[in-house]
Image (cartoon, rainbow, N blue to C red):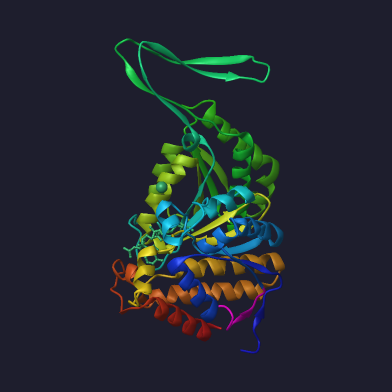
C-alpha cells in the first residue's frame, strides 16, 4: 500500500517470551507494517537477553517509555527456579512488570474486551468495567505474628528522636492464642494512585468510582478517601466537569452491590487487596483471560500497553513440538492498537487513531462473525463457525482490516 499512515513519534516496543513472542512476530508482520509506517525502538526482554544484560535491558526499556511516553509490551516470563534451570539463567531475575511499574510509578488498569457472541455472566453488564488496582503496601507488605497469651499486643511507632506513640490492639488472656498483623501505606503512593486513576478516567471519558471500608477503618481507609478527594479537587475537578464525567466515593460494600446491578462503563479504583480479588472476579465473569487488556499509566502521563495474560507456556510447548495451536491474540493486538491510539492522540494525528480503531473493529468483527480461537469457541453463542489456528486467526483479522481500510 503506497498511502500508508505515518506515526509521527517513535513507539517503544518491548518483546517477550514463549507463545506470546510468536504471536508478537505475526502481529508485526501481518497487522502493522502492511498498513502503517512506525518507527519502533526495540527492547528485547526475552528471558535469555535479560539474563545476558543482567536485566539492564528492562531498565533501559522503562527509561525509553519515560522518554517517548508510549510503549507496547509482549508478555514475559517471571523466572522462578524451574525457569532458571530451563534457560540456564544466572539468577531468578525480578518480574519485568514489577521493575517497569516501580520505575514508572504506575497503576495497572485492566479492561475486558467485549464481543456480542460472548455474554458476561452478569446480565446487566453492557459496557466494560475497568479495574484500577493500587499496587503498593497493605497486606502485601505486612508483618505478622502468631501469639499465645497471656500477653498484650500493641502497635508502636518510634520517631527518629525516640519518641513513641502506641495503641493497644488486644489483651490476650492465658487461655487465648491468636494472630497479629501490621501493615502500612504511604501518602505519596496513594496520591500517585489517585492521580493515575483520574488521568485514566479523563483519558477514557468514563466515571471513576473509589471504595474503601472507611466507616470501620477510620484512620487507614479514611486516609485513602481523603487523599482521593484532595487530589480530585486540586487537580481534576474542573476537567471532569468539562468532560461531564463524575468521581464518586462510596463504601466498598455499597460499591460491590452497585457493580452487580450496573451496566458497566466505568473505572473502579480498588485498594490492593480489593483489586486483587475483584479483578479475578471480573475477568472470569467476562469469559477468557485472552480478552483482557492491561495498561500501566504513570502520573506523569507515560503509558505502557500489554496483554493481561502470561506467555501461554503450554501452547508454546505444543508449538515447539510442531503441533497446531489455537492461541488467542486479541489482548496482544489490543495492546498494539491501544499504544497506537495513544501515540496518535499525543501526536495529534487522528488518522493513526482511526487506523487503531479499525484494527480493533476488524479483530472484534472476526470473532463476532464466528471465526475464533479455541478458548472463545467453548463459550461463544451462537457456536463458532470455525475454530482457527493461531496464525489463521491473525490472517483473518488482517484480511478484514484490508477490507475496512
Ligand atoms: P498464562 O500465560 O496466563 O496462561 C494460562 C492458561 O490460560 C493457558 O494455559 C491457557 O489455557 C489460557 N490462556 C492464557 N492466555 C491465552 C491466550 N492468549 N489464548 C488462549 N488461551 C490462553 O499463564 P502461564 O502459562 O501459567 O504462565 C506462563 C508465564 O507467563 C509464566 O512464566 C509467568 O511468569 C508469565 N506471566 C507473565 C505475565 C506478563 O508478562 N504480563 C503475566 C502473567 C504471567 P489452556 O492451556 O487451558 O488453553
Ligand atoms: Mg488475584
Read off the magenta span.
Answer: 32-39
Whether residue 245 appears in this view of the structure is: no
Q: Which of the 4 image quadrants contains residue 370?
A: bottom left
Q: Is residue 77 above or below residue 41?
A: above
Q: Is residue 291 above or below residue 90?
A: below
Residue 196 coordinates in the image, percent (x, y): 61, 48
Q: Nearer the viewer, residue 117 or 283?
A: 283
Residue 95 coordinates in the image, percent (x, y): 51, 52
Residue 277 coordinates in the image, percent (x, y): 40, 45
Whether residue 403 appears in this view of the structure is: yes
Q: Is residue 232 magenta?
A: no
Q: How many marks?
A: 0
Q: Is residue 33 magenta?
A: yes
**Main SS of residues in magenta:** loop
Q: Nearer the viewer, residue 294 or 145?
A: 145
Q: Is residue 267 left or right of residue 43?
A: left
Q: Nearer the viewer, residue 354 or 377?
A: 377
Q: Is residue 57 above or below residue 245?
A: below
- Residue extending farthest to the bottom is 2
Residue 381 coordinates in the image, percent (x, y): 30, 70
Q: Which quadrant: the N terminus? A: bottom right
Q: Which quadrant: the C terminus? A: bottom right
Q: Which of the 4 image quadrants contains residue 394?
A: bottom left
Q: Which of the 4 image quadrants contains residue 264?
A: bottom left
Amino acid at each position: 500500500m503506497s498511502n500508508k499512515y505515518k506515526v509521527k513519534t517513535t513507539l517503544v516496543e518491548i518483546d517477550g517470551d514463549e507463545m506470546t513472542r510468536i504471536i508478537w512476530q505475526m502481529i508485526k508482520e501481518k497487522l502493522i507494517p502492511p498498513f502503517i509506517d512506525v518507527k519502533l525502538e526495540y527492547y528485547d526482554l526475552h528471558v535469555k537477553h535479560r539474563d545476558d544484560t543482567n536485566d539492564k535491558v528492562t531498565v533501559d526499556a522503562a527509561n525509553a517509555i519515560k522518554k517517548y511516553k508510549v510503549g507496547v509490551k509482549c508478555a514475559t516470563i517471571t523466572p522462578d527456579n524451574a525457569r532458571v534451570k530451563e534457560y540456564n539463567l544466572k539468577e531468578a531475575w525480578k518480574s519485568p512488570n514489577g521493575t517497569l511499574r516501580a520505575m514508572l510509578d504506575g497503576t495497572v488498569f485492566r479492561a475486558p474486551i467485549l464481543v456480542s457472541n460472548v455474554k458476561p455472566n452478569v446480565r446487566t453488564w453492557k459496557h466494560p468495567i475497568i479495574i484500577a488496582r493500587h499496587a503498593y503496601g497493605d497486606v502485601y507488605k505486612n508483618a505478622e505474628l502468631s501469639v499465645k497469651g497471656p500477653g498484650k499486643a500493641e502497635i508502636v511507632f518510634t520517631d527518629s528522636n525516640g519518641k513513641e506513640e502506641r495503641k493497644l490492639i488486644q489483651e490476650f488472656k492465658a487461655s487465648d492464642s491468636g494472630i497479629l498483623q501490621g501493615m502500612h501505606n504511604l501518602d505519596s503512593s496513594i496520591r500517585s494512585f489517585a492521580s493515575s486513576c483520574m488521568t485514566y478516567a479523563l483519558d477514557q471519558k468514563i466515571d471513576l468510582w473509589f471504595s474503601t471500608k472507611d466507616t470501620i477503618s477510620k484512620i487507614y481507609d479514611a486516609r485513602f478517601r481523603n487523599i482521593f478527594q484532595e487530589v480530585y479537587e486540586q487537580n481534576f475537578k474542573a476537567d471532569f466537569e468539562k468532560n461531564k464525567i463524575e468521581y464518586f466515593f462510596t463504601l466498598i460494600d455499597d460499591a460491590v452491590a452497585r457493580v452487580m446491578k450496573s451496566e458497566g462503563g466505568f473505572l473502579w479504583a480498588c485498594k490492593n487487596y480489593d483489586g486483587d480479588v475483584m479483578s479475578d472476579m471480573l475477568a472470569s465473569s467476562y469469559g477468557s483471560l485472552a480478552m483482557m487488556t492491561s495498561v500501566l499509566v504513570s502520573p506523569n502521563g507515560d503509558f505502557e500497553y500489554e496483554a493481561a495474560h502470561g506467555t501461554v507456556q503450554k501452547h508454546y510447548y505444543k508449538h515447539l513440538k510442531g503441533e497446531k495451536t489455537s492461541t488467542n491474540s486479541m489482548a496482544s493486538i489490543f495492546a498494539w492498537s491501544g499504544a497506537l491510539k495513544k501515540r496518535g492522540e499525543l501526536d495529534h494525528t487522528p488518522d493513526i487513531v482511526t487506523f487503531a480503531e479499525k484494527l480493533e473493529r476488524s479483530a472484534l468483527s472476526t470473532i463476532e462473525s464466528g471465526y475464533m480461537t479455541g478458548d472463545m469457541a467453548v463459550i461463544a453463542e451462537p457456536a463458532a463457525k470455525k475454530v482457527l489456528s493461531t496464525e489463521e486467526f491473525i490472517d483473518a483479522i488482517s484480511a478484514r482490516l484490508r477490507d475496512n481500510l
